[in-house]
Amino acid sequence: MPEKLTEKEQLILDLIRNNPYVSQQELAQNLELSRPSIANMISGLIKKGHILGRAYILSESQHVICIGGANIDRKFHIKGQAQLGTSNPSYATQNAGGVARNIAENLGRLGLEVSLISAAGADKDWTIIEDSSTPYMNLETVSKSPEKATGSYTAVLDANGELVIALADMDVYETITPELLRKHEGFLKQSKCIIVDLNSPKETVQYLCHFAKSHNLPIVIIPVSSPKMSRLPDELDGVTWLITNRDESETYFQNEIKNDSDWKNALEKWLSLGISNVVITNGKEGSMIGNKEEGIFHVPPIEVKEIIDVTGAGDAFSSAVIYSWLEGKSLMEIAKAGSMNASKTLQSPYTVRQDLSAEQLQKDLEELS
């Protein structure tokens, strides 16, 4: 239990609550005190457990913490039929992306308190990401390295918005190590939920799973891609959610999913490894979701007449699943929310749809029913 506050400490806490990014100089001017006095009182507030370090994250505000990729998404849209081995007329777009960052923005737009732990270069690409991400998440826990380039994902899309080829430069995420996360242990302990994508090294994901289990915290794993399934921890017992797709599940179990029976089988295998809740998405076939208490359900896809861009749809699905679960919804409601957010994102030119809010998602779901 945090210790009792002095009158001055209470005033500082109130000012920080109103503006978590307020500087010590501004606090000093507001309270007519010297900056060193403010620094001492903030240090006291940290020791007493009322705030959690230099980002002034209040201990009573539980953040969802997203850990993993935050990169620049560059998309080249081919105007006609894609032709390999030659020049294709196209137009280019660029915005902030990365699985963990995309999920953080979705959740921030849905009204949750979100923080991002990631790694980036001290370059122009990071500035672009920072500018578009700051309204939706706390970025104080992103480590920046002048020697590294900010991660980038370059996609070539055909005239239908389908992916032709993608190139990913994600080396910077190898610096998201257990050592880096240990610096944020106090913050992690206070989290509402930890979400980690497999851009993070395997030892980091294993460390987080152990940390979450030992502190009784929910943890969600987002695989990212089939090649990164090798980064899953050896022990999955205690993982709260795994949100995966058919290809990733096929890669992990080295078994093809040819029909509904295979699909259900794969989900049951995941649950047998000790994961509490599992989703396997399967493109136009919809999703399958399950746990040992409620059972396993198939949720049909939501029809999309025109796909504008596939980028970010999987992250939109994962975000709405996590949000709905935190809201206490049933498995069927959770999967439907995921499908709805994904379908709306497919119809948007943005990686995270710009009209997303808790009210809008609820409205979308009401219109569906």
Image (cartoon, rainbow, N blue to C red):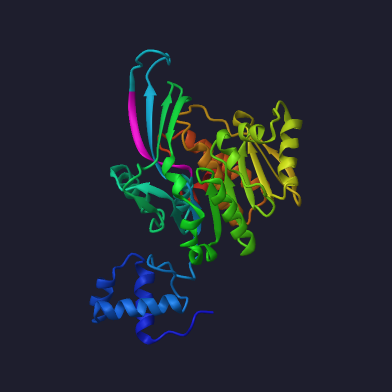
Left or right of residue 288, residue 53 in this image: left
Q: Is 178 a magenta residue?
A: no
Quarter that holds the N terminus = bottom right
Q: Is residue 322 above or below residue 33?
A: above
The one nearer the camera, 265 or 342, is 265
Q: Which segment is the magenta one?
A: 91-99
Q: Position of residue 114 (x, y in %)?
A: 46, 57
Total numbered labels placed on residues in the image: 0
Q: Is residue 275 visible?
A: yes
Q: Is 94 a magenta residue?
A: yes
Left or right of residue 292, residue 102 in this image: left
Q: Is residue 227 above or below residue 316?
A: above
Q: Position of residue 232 (x, y in %)?
A: 61, 44
What residue is rendered at 36% in x and 69% in y? 18
Please tell me in which quadrant of the rendered image residue 308 appears: top left
What residue is rendered at 36% in x and 39% in y? 95
Quarter that holds the C terminus = top right
Q: Position of residue 266 (x, y in %)?
A: 72, 37
Q: Position of residue 28 (x, y in %)?
A: 25, 77
Q: Is residue 323 above or below residue 252?
A: below
Q: Main secondary structure of the magenta part?
A: strand
The one nearer the camera, 22 or 170, is 170
What residue is rendered at 29% in x and 81% in y? 37
The one nearer the camera, 229 or 243, is 229
Please tell me in which quadrant of the rendered image residue 124 appears: top left
Q: Is residue 256 above or below residue 202?
A: above
